[in-house]
């Protein structure tokens, strides 16, 4: 990567930036040399504490033991709302932009505080108390923020399930986290279509005997099925709720939320984040990575169902007193200029989206962009998957008119916040590189034996230091937490990503090294999709791999073996896609199904995925050693029937 293009730091950005090159170098060095002093300073700067901590950090990776700011007490909603009231009660906290371009609304900090207090009282009246888990299954409506913050106000733990997940996936998550309460809407709107929400909850509830109440936000005039004694209308409950609700003092290490994410094996895991460290890390990264200044209008296009929606749509920006935008719709509705129109309409300064959206919009041609103004933009961000240099250049030149630095931010659900990223006033940019570590982050490149490689190197990405935003456990299964992240390479947090470091010390993320795939920025375990496929009575076996896809980054390629005597057909293919939609959701639908009489296996019966990945990617010359296969002719058959799409 010696010839990578470099875009120098922009003087206009650096002159007003919180972090310039010398500041970065100085702060980074201190964050590594004196982490306790460094993080104590930041925790004082960014958060209001009801009681100070006695120990900044206490971590032991061998036990998956991660503790920050123990002894400290604080409340997240107080930090995101109450403390801003003196100075910015009339400032807009949330701009909500509807799927329908004629619908929007603005909520000030005073109004948000009021609604959060009211809903916190509604939750209490339902019996929710500190430590209880509340499942949130909502479309992108403004109330989503109210519900999240209300949970934090009374110390309940939220578990947000992405609105695109199926009833079955919702049920699994409700059961795993022992949620007795669900907050949902009647229906959702996306791209001019409606999505069922409440009906999915009703179906999921059939398998959730412990569910006590379902609070339903009325988002339409549609009639929905109603279960007296269990279902409650949000607007009715809110009418009678007091807007006075003291914020419960939470220990820094009390759980804040659970968020399910996919791993390479088994069912999705409930990643557990805790209160003090997470909030500090979300707020601090939000301010420095996006060079956020008071008065900026900030828009992150993520869904609240993902970690980006948690950290960079809600907690980070609101903790910093920002105006944050929540968009209900999709980038192409009513037309492919929707993002750029919204930027002009609300005069957005900082815009954060995913490469898959950039590629999809790039494919629509420049006119949709150039017919808008976008002069309010100052910083552009990218997240969720590697951004190919072509998409990066388009984003930078066409969307940002070569004026706005692009911050390509690498992080994960488990990291809570951004880990490797450019800081706009401090670093030159290389398209396709996530650049350099954030404060306190120490990336290591490991070889197969776990040796840390120095200088220019390529290997797996691990982190040797803890940081405040790090996940604390997998809900209900701490051993799985240890096994997944801390066992493969002793003394390190293992990320599951591959990485390269270049001659300037810049990091280039090369993608997952495990059986996790990234489809349109959505992280999925191939094992989950396989489990859904084999539920079909005609399916004997299935193996799923990712393959390069122009828009989605990776597409889903399924190799399926049918039971003896069953004929493959278009109809069966449809049934399998429907089954995956029903078990997981539309985001997991296979793009390609290839029928195969057998899967390539070793003599011990292990599927050789490496070969399937190569076939799916059409890299037929690089199949590698196939001599350990039980039956090498299986590969010839698979190659001969490879599906091109
Ligand atoms: O493979 C990396 C990829 O997304 C994974 C994390 O997915 P998730 O937990 O859903 O969080 C997504 C939002 C933070 C990572 O292991 N990834 C995320 N950001 C980038 C990335 N890959 C390359 N470059 C990025 N900027």
Image (spheres, rainbow, N blue to C red):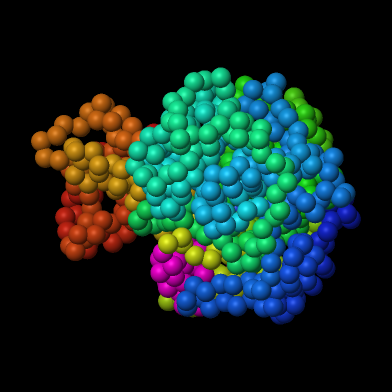
**Percent x, y for residue 60?**
53, 78
Residue 545, position in %: x, y?
36, 48
Quadrant of the image occupied by residue 559: top left
Seen in the picture, residue 184 relative to 620 is either above or below; the reply is above
> Position of 570 compared to 67: left or right?
left
Is residue 487 on the magenta stretch? yes
Residue 426 percent across, percent down from the top left: 78, 60
Name the one closer to the observer, 459 or 113: 113
Residue at 62% in and 31% down: 235
Q: Position of residue 608 (x, y in %)?
A: 28, 57
Toward which corner of the image does residue 188 lie, by quadrant?
top right
- Can the viewer see residue 1 in this picture? no
Q: Is residue 259 above or below residue 375?
A: below
Where is the C terminus found, in terms of image quarters? Answer: top left
- State the extent of the magenta-drawn residues as a range: 477-501
Quadrant assignment for the N terminus: bottom right
Q: Is residue 48 visible to us here?
A: yes
The foreground one among 442 and 630 is: 442
Is residue 18 one of those drawn in magenta?
no
């Amino acid at each position: 990567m010696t010839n990578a293009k470099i875009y120098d730091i922009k003087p206009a950005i650096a002159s007003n930036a919180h972090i310039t090159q010398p500041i970065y170098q100085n702060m980074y060095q201190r964050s590594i040399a004196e982490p306790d002093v460094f993080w104590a300073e930041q925790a004082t700067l960014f958060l209001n504490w009801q009681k100070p901590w006695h120990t900044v950090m206490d971590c032991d990776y061998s036990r998956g033991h991660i503790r920050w700011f123990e002894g400290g007490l604080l409340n997240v909603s107080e930090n995101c709302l109450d403390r801003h009231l003196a100075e910015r009660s009339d400032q807009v906290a949330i701009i909500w932009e509807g799927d329908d371009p004629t619908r929007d609304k603005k909520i000030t900090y005073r109004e948000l505080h009021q609604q959060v207090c009211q809903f916190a009282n509604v939750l209490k009246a339902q019996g929710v108390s500190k430590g209880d888990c509340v499942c949130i299954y909502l479309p992108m409506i403004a109330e989503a923020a109210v519900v999240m913050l209300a949970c934090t106000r009374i110390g309940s733990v939220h578990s947000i399930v992405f609105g695109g997940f199926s009833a079955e996936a919702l049920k699994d998550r409700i059961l795993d986290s022992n949620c007795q309460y669900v907050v949902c809407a009647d229906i959702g709107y996306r791209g001019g279509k409606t999505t069922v929400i409440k009906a999915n909850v009703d179906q999921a509830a059939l398998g959730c005997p412990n569910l006590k109440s379902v609070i339903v936000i009325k988002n339409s005039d549609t009639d929905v099925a109603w279960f007296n004694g269990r279902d409650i209308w949000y607007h009715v409950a809110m009418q009678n709720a007091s807007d006075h609700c003291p914020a419960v003092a939470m220990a820094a290490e009390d759980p804040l939320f659970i968020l399910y994410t996919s791993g390479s094996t088994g069912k999705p895991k409930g990643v557990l984040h805790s209160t003090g460290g997470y909030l500090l890390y979300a707020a601090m990264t939000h301010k420095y990575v996006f060079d956020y200044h008071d008065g900026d209008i900030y828009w992150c296009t993520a869904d609240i169902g993902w970690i980006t929606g948690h950290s960079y749509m809600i907690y980070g920006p609101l903790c910093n007193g920002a105006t944050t935008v929540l968009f209900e719709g999709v980038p192409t509705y009513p037309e492919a200029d929707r993002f750029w129109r919204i930027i002009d309409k609300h005069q957005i300064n900082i815009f954060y989206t995913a490469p898959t959206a950039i590629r999809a919009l790039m494919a629509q041609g420049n006119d949709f962009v150039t017919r808008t103004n976008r002069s309010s933009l100052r910083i552009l961000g990218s997240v969720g998957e590697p951004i190919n240099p072509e998409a990066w250049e388009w984003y930078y030149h066409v969307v940002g008119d070569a004026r706005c630095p692009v911050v390509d931010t690498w992080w994960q659900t488990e990291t809570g916040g951004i880990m490797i990223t450019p800081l706009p006033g401090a670093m030159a940019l290389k398209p396709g590189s996530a650049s350099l570590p954030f404060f306190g982050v120490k990336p290591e490149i490991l070889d197969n034996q776990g040796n840390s490689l120095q200088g220019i190197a390529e290997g797996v990405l691990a982190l040797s230091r803890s940081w405040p935003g790090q996940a604390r456990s997998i809900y209900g299964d701490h051993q799985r937490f240890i096994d997944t992240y801390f066992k493969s390479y002793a003394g390190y947090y293992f990320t599951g990503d591959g990485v390269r470091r270049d001659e300037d010390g810049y990091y280039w993320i090369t993608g997952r090294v495990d059986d996790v795939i990234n489809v349109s920025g959505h992280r999925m375990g191939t094992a989950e999709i396989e489990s859904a496929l084999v539920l079909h009575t005609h399916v004997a076996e299935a193996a799923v791999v990712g393959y390069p896809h122009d828009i989605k980054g990776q597409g889903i390629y399924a190799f399926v073996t049918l039971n003896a005597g069953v004929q493959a057909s278009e109809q069966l293919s449809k049934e399998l896609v429907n089954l995956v939609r029903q078990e997981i959701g539309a985001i997991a639908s296979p793009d390609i199904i290839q029928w195969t009489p057998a899967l390539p296996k070793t003599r011990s019966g292990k599927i050789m995925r490496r070969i399937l990945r190569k076939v799916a990617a059409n890299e037929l010359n690089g199949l590698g050693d196939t001599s350990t296969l039980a039956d090498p002719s299986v590969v010839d058959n698979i190659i001969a029937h490879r599906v091109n799409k």
